[in-house]
Amino acid sequence: MSHLRPKVIALYKQASSGRDYPAGYHDFFRPKLKAAFFKKKDLTDEKDILKAIQFGDYIIKEIEMMYYLRKYRTLRKRYNQTD
């Protein structure tokens, strides 16, 4: 399983870059992220670990889409204002 460890560490680093999370990074996002990773720390089967990594990638993509949606809504609000 040592060949999967760098993938898990890279996933954690990528997920922890969610500093712009709307509910707050230190108050909400980081404790939830840490709890999710600690909950899966006892996995030993390679298939289970790969499944957890794929789910983590999915969650990261969902968070990125949330950021893009927030950016889109902000730009739309700015440019659709009629003064």
Image (spheres, rainbow, N blue to C red):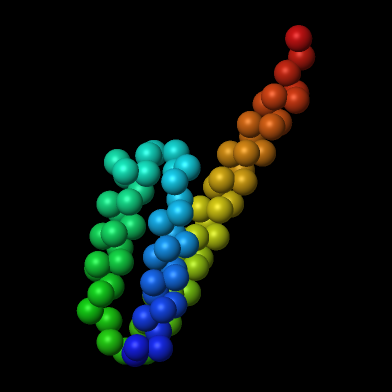
Residue depicted at x 73% and y 18%: 81
Can you tell which quarter of the image residue 16 is in? Answer: bottom left
Residue 35 % position (x, y): 26, 60
Residue depicted at x 44% and y 59%: 15
Q: Quadrant of the C terminus?
A: top right
Residue depicted at x 40% and y 84%: 4
Compared across the picture, whether 80 is left or right of 31 comes to right
Is residue 47 visible in the rendered image? The answer is: no
Is residue 81 visible in the rendered image? The answer is: yes
Compared across the picture, whether 10 is left or right of 80 comes to left
Q: Nearest the camera: 29 or 19?
A: 19
Residue 17 % position (x, y): 45, 54
Compared across the picture, whether 83 is left or right of 31 comes to right
Residue depicted at x 62% and y 46%: 68
Residue 14 % position (x, y): 47, 62
Q: Quadrant of the N terminus?
A: bottom left
Residue 40 % position (x, y): 28, 73
Q: Nearest the camera: 19 or 82?
A: 19
79 relative to 37, above or below: above
Numbered circles on residues, count: 0
